[in-house]
Image (cartoon, rainbow, N blue to C red):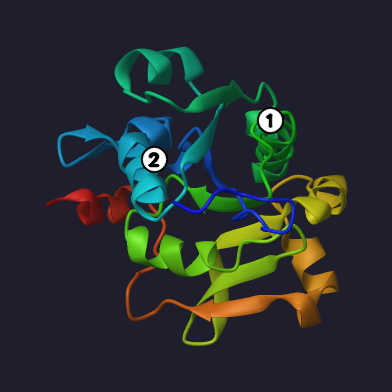
Amino acid sequence: MTPLTPETPRTPLVAGLLLAAGGGRRLGGRPKALLPYRGRPLVENAVRVLREGGCPVVHVVLGASAELVRERAELPGCVVVENPEWAGGMGSSLRVGLASLAADPRGVDAALVSLVDQPGIGAAAVARLRAHGARDALAAASYEGKRGHPVLFGADRWAGIAAGAEGDRGAREYLAAHREAVALVECADVAEPFDIDTEADLYRLDG
């Protein structure tokens, strides 16, 4: 193995940031993180996908029924943080997650943000986004030209993203304001970006 020298740039550290705080209001109040998927809580699948996609560091933001999720889900090696304001929307969870990554002593260069309720997005899509990791990166998965998740934010952009992350908007306004800088990474051939939002969507968790 070639030793690192001052002239050898290190590979950017891309961490997975999993937003798993949702309370499942349209699912009868069942926290999305604990929905059963292949015999285990859905949050475990989302963490596995991030790791298999090449994210060695994973931070998980919990909210609804956080203590219950900690008890029932196995999340070894993850940095687990709680968002007490989870009911206010995804924006606060994104802020909590980015703050957690900024404090990680391993020096994270980019955050690959995924949502717990999108099991149709697997490791292949994560790997495609991860390849764009850099401190100034701004990238998003694209499905036949339409922007979706996951998204990737370089660390140099976290402060600006957090400043506009309110309610359910997340990073939407930041991405719109920096549209020309967003690298769209086509993933329609390897992923399906559906959400588990209502009772009618639960069939997608079968199998």
**In this view, 107 is above or below 203:** above
Task: Give whichever of 16, 12 is nearer the camera.
Answer: 12
Numbered badge on residue 100: 1
Residue type for callout 1: Ser
Residue pointed to by mark 2: 47
Q: Position of residue 71 (x, y in %)?
A: 35, 12
Whole-angstrom CA distance, mark 1 to mark 2, is: 16 Å
Q: Earlier in the sequence, mark 1 or mark 2?
A: 2
Q: Quadrant of residue 116?
A: top left
Residue type for callout 2: Val
> 21 left or right of 109?
left
Task: Give whichever of 122, 72 is nearer the camera.
Answer: 122
The residue lying at 37 percent from left, 23 percent from top is 76
The residue lying at 71 percent from left, 75 percent from top is 182
Q: Quadrant of residue 42?
A: top left
Please report contact status of discs 1 and 2: CB closer than 8 Å, yes or no: no
The residue lying at 67 percent from left, 21 percent from top is 84
The local crowd at label 1, few if under 14, some if 14 to 19, many if 20 or more residues have their Cα within 10 Å, is some
> 90 left or right of 149?
right
Task: Give whichever of 120, 98 is nearer the camera.
Answer: 98
**In this view, 147 is above or below 40:** below
